[in-house]
Structure formats: C-alpha cells, structure tokens
Image (spheres, helix red, strand yellow):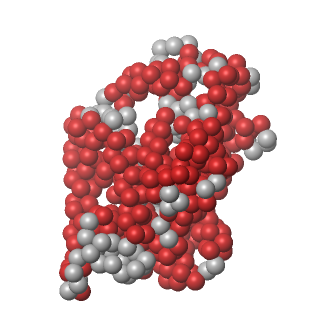
Amino acid sequence: MTRSLRHDLYAVGAAALLVTVAVLVGRRIQDTRHVLYVHWPPLLAQWDPHLGPGTPAAVLLAAAGVAYGPTLAARLPWPALLATAWAAATAWILSLALVDGWHRGLAGRLTTREEYLRVIGRFHDIPATLRDFTHHIVAGTPDPWPAHVAGHPPAATLTFVLLDRVGLRGGGWAGTWCVLTGATACVAVLVAVRALADETLARRAAPFLVLTPAAVWFGVSADGWFAAVAAWTVALLALAVTRRSPALAAASGILLGLTCYLSYGLTLVALPLLAVLLLGRNGVRARPVLLAALLAGLAVVPVAFTLAGFDWWTAYHLLVTRYFQGVGGRRPYGYWVWANLACTVLITGPATVAGLRRTSVALTRATDTGDTGDTGDARDAGAPTRTAPAPARRLALLVCAALLALLIADLSGMSKAETERIWLPFAMWLLPACAYLPRPRAWLAAQTVLALLLNHLLLTGW
C-alpha cells in the first residue's frame, strides 16, 4: 500500500469516526433533551430497513456504473459523455427514489414535506401574492406561509405554480421535474471542470458525479432543482471566461439572480463564481467586460421581482425571525455546527473525503505528472516534490471555493440540520475532487454501497 493511499484511508477513517460520533451523540441528545427534531441524527430519517420497486434497478445501475463507468467516461466523445451522464444520473436518482415506492419515495414527498404544492391556490393572482408575500412569513401573522414556503424567496414556490398552470399538476410531476432538472447538475459541473481545468480531469470525475450518494435526496427535494440552477450559473460563467463571451456571462448572471430568488442561502454561490473569474485563462483584459455582462444579467430577476412588489431584503430579515420562532431556534448550534459536516460526508461519500485530502496536496506539494490529475505524494515514487500540474491546481481552487461556501453556511447557524438536502448545491462541487483518485472502481463501489445502504436502511425525510 502506498503512502498516499494510506493517507486517503486515514482521512476516510476520520470521516467515518465523525459520522459515528454524530450518530451516537445525536441520539443521546434527542433521547434525553428532544431538541434535535430528527429521529436518526444527523439525518432527518428513521431506521426502517426495507426493499422496494426501485431496488433491482438501483443495484444493477450501481454494478454497471462501477464496472463500465470509468471506461465509458474515458472513451465516449464529449457530447455523448454529457448526454450519457445526464441519462445515467436521472436513472440513478429515480431508482433510488423508487426504493420507497412511487408515492412515499417521489410524488408524496414534495406534497407532504416541502409544502410548495399546498399553497398553489394562494397564487391565483401572482402579482398580488408577490406584493403580499412578506406579510405572511413570520409566525403569528394572518395565514402564515408553511415553513418551506416562508423559508424561501417566492421563485421556489412559483416553480411549482407555473408547472401547475401548464397542466403538470401534483406531486408526481413536481417530483419528475426535480429529478430531470436535478440530474443536469452533474452535466453542468462537467462542463465547468473541462473549461477551467481540463477534459481529462472532467472525464475522471464523471462517474463520481453520476453515482453520488447525494442522489438519495436529489429526487425527493426541490433542492435538486435549486442545485441544478446554481450549477449552470457557474458552468455558464466558466464557459464565458474561457471563450470571452459576454452573452454567456449575461446568461450566467440571469441564472444567478434566479438562484438567489430560489434560496436565500444560495447567495454563497458567489464564492465559486469568484473562483471562476480568477481562474479565467484569457487574461485580465476580458474580465471587466465579462463582469459588466454578468452584473447586467444579474439585475434582471431582482428587478422583475422588485417591480412586482417583493422585497428580498425585507423577506430575508423576516425569515430570520421565523427561523428562530420554529425548531431552528431550539436546535443546538453546538451540535449541528459539526454534525452538519457529518451529513456532508454521507451525501458526498468516502471517495470525496479522500479526494479532498488530495485536493490539499494539489495546492501544496505533488508530483508533476502532466494533466492526469494524479496528485499522489511525490515521496511514494521517490521523486522530488514539485508543483502540481496547472489543471490539478485549478480544479483544487474551484473545489476549495465550494468548500468555503459550505463552511460559511455552516457557521452562519441558519442551516441547523437537514443539510443533506439544503447543501446539495455546494456538495456537487466537492465531488470533482474524486478525479484525483487512482483505482476509481474501488472508490465508486464505496460510493454506491453507501448510497444503497442509506436508501435501504433508512426512511429519509426527504
């Protein structure tokens, strides 16, 4: 066993210990004080070993992905790889959701848990509802919004209102929308990694982006849709800075505005976007023009909502009040500030933990092996320590920007629990760190086994 692999396993062991402690301490706190408001901390889930109609497909997809995923990712033409990644991610998300059955696993979750579909009737006059939206955020006001409607800007609910208006009514269509759009997030990440680092690293990351344990939550939560919009925001800006395209920068800005009106916390996507601007390889002369186009696009959605009568800043401050009125105010920060990270380990998997360790190597010392993304310790081969290849360093910086955004969200105290779904938009940008790993099939097997165990041993709340 090489020194680098041992270090990977040490990191995975430490992450497994973090999860174990989070489970044991969380169970103790919940059993004695009842302040976590989750049945299987740190996840919103309950112990319920079960099989379901999606089990055979999920197992077959996992086996096929482990056996053939790395080879297909390396050999398929790039357009075909993107299409295949989306199709495979869709199948993986859907099969995992259907382990719990159609209603309990997919259609019913968006109706019973996230509540967006319950308030569609209150949006019969959309402009009037937007003008009145902030008056119903705080608990105790007349007809307060349900928790998830109040906890997000109105674009989140409007997504499902508009689906209803075009005839795609009910939880089945809402769940299908989240699956189909959420699956495109992996495509967006691949596009960005190829543009900012190189195609080899993107191809190495592709199987891990498809077969991620986060897929357990992508198909049963609107956060999968939010993650896709955020991912395409970053991807379009990555294309803009590499192609010097103001049009793509403006499109990225429009999506950034939409992202901020889907979830208040996703303003932190600004950190990966800043990394993209810094990593642009066409020099600083093009950046002022691209930045101007980005800002022009960014103004579109906020201006539209503001003219319609919705005040984002007022709504956010009212949300903070509502958050601390509910279970968010009673959940202990001292537990969740580190247990949230255990949730992140579970949704990104052991391969990502090892990949993040190698990300730190790519930023410090590594063997210059060309553009293969191999960031094993140079001492393993007896070679001198040298600078990591430029693509590996560039990918490391992008991953670190997403990690920083996640840590800021954690420290804010506004994400106590349920981060297995809330942090999906940030978790997607940690997965490309798996491109640094040798022996991809072994790591992919670990990822899929974790996803299957989570979905079959626990009944997740999302």
- Whether residue 247 appears in this view of the structure is yes
Residue drawn where x is 33% and y is 27% of the image: 329
Residue drawn where x is 23% and y is 34% of the image: 33
Image location of residue 46, percent across then percent down? 39, 49
Q: Is residue 243 above or below residue 335?
A: below
Q: Residue furthest right?
A: 166
The one nearer the camera, 321 or 454, is 321
Quadrant location of residue 12? bottom left
**Total numbered labels placed on residues in the image:** 0
Residue drawn where x is 40% and y is 69% of the image: 390
Q: Is residue 63 above or below residue 101?
A: below
The one nearer the camera, 169 or 300, is 300
- Whether residue 421 appears in this view of the structure is no
Image location of residue 446, percent across then percent down? 38, 72
Decide if residue 362 is on the left or right side of residue 70: left
Q: Is residue 457 above or below residue 164?
A: below
Decide if residue 353 is on the left or right side of residue 109: left
The N terminus lies in quadrant: bottom left
Residue drawn where x is 33% and y is 72% of the image: 388
Q: Is residue 240 above or below residue 266?
A: below
Image location of residue 368, percent across then percent down? 33, 78
Image location of residue 40, percent across then percent down? 34, 48
Decide if residue 83 is on the left or right side of residue 461: right
